[in-house]
Image (cartoon, grey):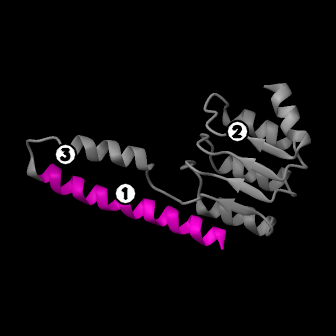
Amino acid sequence: MSYRVTQMIVNEYLNIFIRKEFSEISICNVIRSCPRLQQLDLSYCEITDITIKEIARSCLNLKYLDLEGCYNISEEAIDQLISLNPNIHVDNFLESSAPPDFIESVRNYLIQPNVANKRFLAQHLQQFLDLNMWARSTVRRCAEH
């Protein structure tokens, strides 16, 4: 990992996309050692507000942050990051109470035959999932303009 991270640091770009084997502490340590970082992709990493606060403290030059699939981050943490670094573009952040794949798993369980109430609940979960996906696409379109 060290050669690859070193190579990316020189380029001021770090991609930790879907690296679940890295703990939040490890990710924060890498971020802390990259003060010149300009682009950071943390998509699908299991991070929290702790990582966002470390980014706000350590990466003052950061211009782009991708948080797709990061569901344990509060809107307050993102607002604080943006207030400390107004030039940053945070992509794919949408505060969510449950990840879409979890909602889909519950929905799939509930559509199993035998109870009518399960089907009713499954329909409403599907509507929630559709709304969640629509909101994500709207955020992406707004960010592009």
Q: CA distance from mark 1 to mark 3?
A: 15 Å
Is 65 drawn above or below residue 24 in the view shown? below
Using residue 111 as the reference point, say whether residue 90 is left or right of it: right
Q: Residues within 10 Å of mark 1 (few under 14, many from 20)?
A: many
Amino acid type at image mark 3: Ile
The kind of secondary structure element at disc 3 is loop
Q: Are marks 1 and 2 in contact (CB under 8 Å)?
A: no
Is 75 drawn above or below residue 72 in the view shown? below
Q: CA distance from mark 3 to mark 2?
A: 36 Å
Residue in the picture at 75% in, 48% down: 40
Amino acid type at image mark 1: Leu
Question: Which quadrant holds residue 61?
Answer: bottom right
The residue that mark 1 highlights is 129
Q: Main secondary structure of the magenta part?
A: helix
The kind of secondary structure element at disc 2 is loop
The residue that mark 3 highlights is 111
Q: Provide the residue span drawn in magenta.
A: 117-145
The residue that mark 2 highlights is 16
Residue in the picture at 19% in, 45% down: 111
* Residue 26, x across and y down, in percent: 74, 33
Q: Earlier in the sequence, mark 1 or mark 3?
A: 3
* Residue 140, x across and y down, in percent: 58, 64
Residue 28 can be seen, yes or no: yes
Q: Residues within 10 Å of mark 2 (few under 14, many from 20)?
A: some
